[in-house]
Image (cartoon, grey):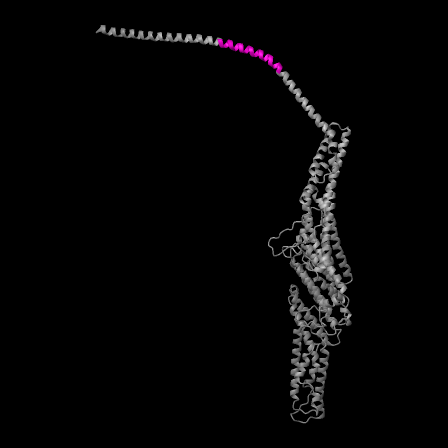
Amino acid sequence: MGITSRMIPTEDASARKREIEEKLKQEQETLSFIRENLEKSDQLTKGMVSILSSFESRLMQLENSIIPVHKQTENLQRLQENVDKTLSCMDHVISYYHVAKDTDRIIREGPTGRLDEYLACIAKIQKAVEYFQDNNPDSPELNTVKARFEKGKELLEAEFRSLLTRYSKPVPPILILDAISVDEELEVQEDVVLEHLPEAVLQDIICIAGWLVEYGRNQDFMNVYFQIRSNQLDRSIKGLKDHFRKNSANSGILYSPAVQTKRKDTPTKKAPKRPVYIPGTIRKAQNLLKQYSQHGLDGKKGGSNLTPLEGYDHDSRVKHLSDAVTEKHGAAAGKDDVLDIEIDSYIHCISAFVKLAQSEYALLAEIIPEHHQKKTFDSLIQEALDNLMLEGDNIVSAARRAIMRHDYSAVLTIFPILRHLKMNKAEFDSTLQGTAASTKNKLPTLITSMETIGAKALEEFADSIKNDPDKEYNMPKDGTVHELTSNAILFLQQLLDFHETAGAMLASQETSSSAVSYTSEFNKRLLSTYICKVLGNLQLNLLSKSKVYEDSALSAIFLHNNYNYTLKSLEKSELIQLVTVTQKKAEGSYRELIEQQIQMYQRSWLKVTEHLTDRNMPVFQPGTKLKDKERQVIKDKFKGFNDGLEELCKIQKGWAIPDKEQRDFIRQAQRRVVSDTYRAFLHRCANVSFTKNPEKYHKYRPEEVEEMIGRLFDTSA
């Protein structure tokens, strides 16, 4: 057992030894392989190092040979570039010396028709000037190119003036009227474009202006611009005036046919852009009022100048005064037509000025530098604006002179103009925004002048109604409406057409602290107060005038006619609505006055009917024989009635009551009273024998009496 155990480890050790020896042998072989490879690698490395060393040596030799050549070549290239640059600079410099010669022909011929080419030449000359100033300021060439530059600039300025002068034309009147007119039937208005210059010409002018500002350093062209355009603006407005003078009187065409316009009596919230005046509406009233100031129609006593109203007869005594004015004063009417055109023309010219000025500013904004636009525009519009304001001042002066002559109709001329000025003031102010204060204040000053003279005329007219003298020869013999009444009503009716303007005119003269802020309602109350004042003055004067008549009945007819005419006129023209603003019971007061005068008239018949009363009438029984004294009483009553009836009918037949309704009413009432009284008297005397010739005293049947009374106030009967 012990021998076996010792033998096993010995065998394992031998095997282990052999295994180790084999591994050692393998490692030795591997090591030998590695050594062989290392030796080969060393040999290859030595060969590569040798090759690289040889290559490095050769590169160094090549570099030493090439670098000097490269540097030499680089220097040669730099020299070549410098030569080229020098030659180029020489050519450039030499070209400056030839600029004057090269551009001479183009500069001499000017820019007309070739502006781009001309500006290119100017640019060359400008560069030459800059070159010589920087590099050779003492050279004669500098003076040459400077002179050429100034010449070119002068020709550009001349071209600017020439283009503006040649192509600036007055705007045709028809086009202006289209621009300021509004067709109220169109919801969206089409603006009429006012083209002042052809587009190509405008672009040339803009180009020249831009060059003169940037390079020419010259603002003289702005003066040239505003002078030429100012002249065209003024000529456009004058052309519109001539259009009215030549065409309006003959054809009646006051507006462009392209756009029809409608008249508004009062401005609405949205103020129309067109004039709102129809010629002749004011002039008729002026004719009537002027005739009144000349003390009667055609110098005839008792003449009447009623404006016909519904219900009034158009007989020889009651007719519209304008017929007589046309017949008697044809030449004057022609002058009035001319004045109508002048007023209408002026109103249109105000609107035209605003539209044209706006158009001019739009044109100016494209040509003139922004910081010079307002000043240039201010200068441009001065002539046209001054002419308009001067014309307005002349209207005010003429009105002032007329008022001094007690011709208050002149204020009627101011109304349409003043209303139009105030309606357009906001747009006027907007157009003149940015101009000098003196320019912006011209229109407000004119408006103030018109309001002042207008208010003065209104007040003096009211005083003239109150103080009109009671001249017997100027009183209507037939008791019809007095000139004073018809003219006062006519004047007030014109105020109705311009009630807002008239109210503001009166308010402008208010100085009380309560009138600091004038509202439309305040102005309306002022106008109502004024109208009531005129009517009150008229009533007092008529009452005084009525005393000229010796016959109290004719006096009553006179007052009745005037009061009735006044009331009917107020109602027909809606003046009554203005009156009732401050006098609520005005209509009732007039009706009471009218009724009072009817009663006063009816008293004139008492001297006829008093003969038919029972006073002094004898008491008798039917069939009883009367005494001589009693018979004489009855005879006297018949005779008194007959004579009184004939006398009154003869006299009153020549009196006038123009209002048919009132005439019929008064006739009927009187006919009924007299007829009933007469019938009762005849009935009492029916069976009484007071004379052998009853037909001598019983001259008229009741029907005949009624017929006679029915012919009262009828001159044609």
- One can see residue 158 in this view: yes
Q: Reply yes or no: does residue 493 show up in magenta.
A: no
Residue 458 location (% of width, % of height) = 72, 61
Residue 193 drawn at (x, y percent): 65, 49
Tell me if residue 296 can be seen: no
Residue 631 screen position, x and y as percent: 70, 91
Residue 64 within the magenta-colored segment of the rendering: yes
> Considering only vertical position in the picture, is 401 above or below 697?
above
Nearest the eye: 270 or 175: 175
Q: Give the range drawn in magenta.
A: 47-69
Q: Quadrant of residue 247?
A: bottom right
Q: Quadrant of the N terminus?
A: top left
The quadrant holding residue 19 is: top left
Question: Is 209 located above or below residue 532 in the figure?
Answer: above
* Residue 101 % position (x, y): 75, 32
User: Quick check: 370 above or below 610?
Assistant: above
Q: Quadrant of residue 716?
A: bottom right
Position above or below: 264 against 314: above
Disc tally is 0
Give the farthest residue toward the left: 1
Of all residues, the one furthest to the top in this rendering is 3
Q: Which of 124 and 314 is in front in this view?
A: 124
